[in-house]
Image: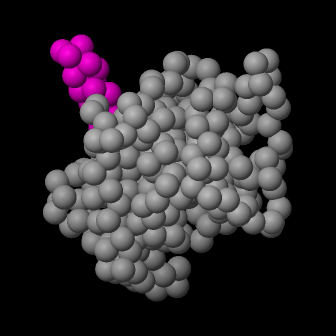
Amino acid sequence: MAHAPNMPAPVALPGVSKIVAVGSGKGGVGKTTVAVNLAIALSRMGQRVGLIDADIYGPNVPIMMGSAQQPAVGPGNQIVPNLTHGIKTISIGYISPGDKPLVMRGPMLHQIIRQFIQQVEWGELDYLIVDLPPGTGDVVISLVQTVPLTGAIVVSTPSDVSLQDARKALEMFAQVNVEVLGIVENMSHFICPHCHQEIDIFSKGGAERTAQQFNVPFLGAIELLPSIREGGDRGLPVTLAGPKSPQAAEFYAIAEKLMVHAEAAAAAATDVIEIS
């Protein structure tokens, strides 16, 4: 995979097969919820999975994974990631817990992202999922400068406001030569528990139309369910219930599609390297 002009060439991470970034154009669309549940779904499907919480200013992965343990430091000053629900995980929230905000400039963000990638004992992984912060800022640039990405997922609600920012995220990944493996529509619809009618609180279908417009895969639509929010708040994501759970089934279906597109992207990247 080529890197954008004026950017240093990224260096592959030994032992890690595929690196997938999960991003969005704006906050509040459930990006971390999708990243965490996809990581667990992939793990339950037999994949070796790591998860980087790259949202330095607003790290939510520790809460959603139900772990606040500070990582240990191993030989060579390497950070040992937390192992939670079978996922190797690192977050600034483990290192600097609590409500105190982190105030830092771009160069410090770049250093933290590099440490999370290069100074963590990831070992052998099939997938390293990177939960990006919202927007199109420094963290994404630091990431693509540091390590070659297999691709990215864009998460959006179906509302026009969210989709406008999702299109910016799609354009951002195109500018840095990162393949978009698909779009996920989160909070797609709500089934009333009383009348059992579908209510489109944030509209419906906008992400799929955007995927068609940008010629990228549409991975699926996740229903607006209280159980998904409750699972994240309790540190017990719904995907822990397995693929037969009605609340988790769509995450597993999305994970299956992601694996197909990620395998194809990884194979294509290998072919390019071999030809050159």
Q: Is residue 75 visible?
A: yes
Position of the N terminus, as image quadrant, is: top left
Q: Quadrant of residue 273?
A: top left
Residue at figure coordinates x 21%, y 67% from the top left: 209
State the residue lying farthest toward the front: 6
Residue 271 shown in magenta: yes
Image quadrant holding the C terminus, namely top left
Viewer-nearest residue: 45 or 83 = 83
Rendering coords of residue 229 (x, y %)? 62, 67
Q: Along the line of sight, which residue is nearer the eye, 242 or 59? A: 59
Answer left or right for 218 relative to 107: left
Q: Is residue 58 above or below residue 109?
A: below
Over which residues does the magenta segment extend? 261-276
Residue 269 occupies quadrant: top left
Looking at the image, which residue sits at the far top?
274
Residue at screen point 58% across, 63% down: 228
Residue at 53 percent across and 58 percent down: it is: 133
Is 71 located above or below residue 92 in the figure? Answer: above
Q: In the image, is residue 35 part of the stretch drawn in magenta?
A: no
Image location (x, y in percent) of residue 189: 40, 74
Residue depicted at 52% across the width and 19% down the height: 14
Q: Is residue 242 visible?
A: no
Dominant secondary structure (helix, strand or loop) of the stretch shown in magenta = helix
**Which residue is more in the foreground, 154 or 86?**
154
Residue 8, position in %: x, y?
40, 34
Q: Quadrant of residue 26?
A: bottom left
- Identify whether 42 is placed above or below 161: above
Direction from residue 124 to residue 140 in the image, left or right: left
